[in-house]
Amino acid sequence: MKNRLIDLNNHLFSQLERLSDESMTAEQIENEVKRTDAIVAVSEQLIRNSDLSLKAATLVANHGDRFKPMLPTIFRQPETLDGKAITDGTEK
């Protein structure tokens, strides 16, 4: 996954294909269902986060930059070290 919403969409479809595999045993299906539940929970959070970012961008687009200082984590450029994003002084 490359951390884009289209990649999330592809990942969800891949999981759906795994769930549709008719050759799986009951135990394998149970394991895939647990995995699916975890994927869905994380996906929902990612979608909520993206929705919040979109709402913030819409707010700035509709009302100008006067709200921008109140939204620093959305519009702040990430700090980088050798082209890699860093947070709290640790390299990612």
Image (tube, grey):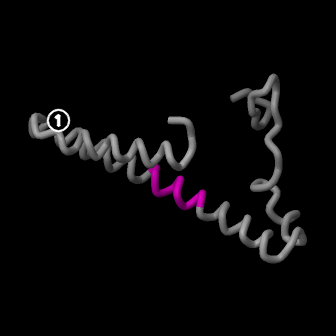
- The residue at the point 42 percent across, 43 percent down is 10
Label 1 residue SS: helix
Extreme residue in the bottom direction: 63
Residue receiving disc 1: 28
Q: Position of residue 24 (x, y in %)?
A: 12, 35
The rendered magenta stretch, by its main secondary structure, is classed as helix
Q: Nearer the viewer, residue 87 or 56?
A: 56
Q: Is residue 85 above or below residue 43?
A: above
- The residue at the point 86 percent across, 72 percent down is 64
Q: How many marks?
A: 1
Give the magenta range.
42-50
Quarter residue 60 falls in: bottom right
Q: Mark 1 belongs to which amino acid? A: Gln
Q: Nearer the viewer, residue 88 or 64?
A: 64
Horizontal side, residue 14 vs residue 65: left or right:
left
- The residue at the point 78 percent across, 37 percent down is 88
Q: Position of residue 53 (x, y in %)?
A: 67, 60
Indicate yes or no whether the magenta region holds residue 66: no
Q: Is residue 71 above or below residue 92?
A: below
Quadrant of the rendering where the C terminus is positioned: top right
Horizontal side, residue 5 vs residue 64: left or right:
left
Crowding near the residue tagged with mark 1, few <14, some 14–19, many ≥20 C-alpha atoms within 10 Å? few
Horizontal side, residue 45 vs residue 66: left or right:
left
Extreme residue in the top direction: 82
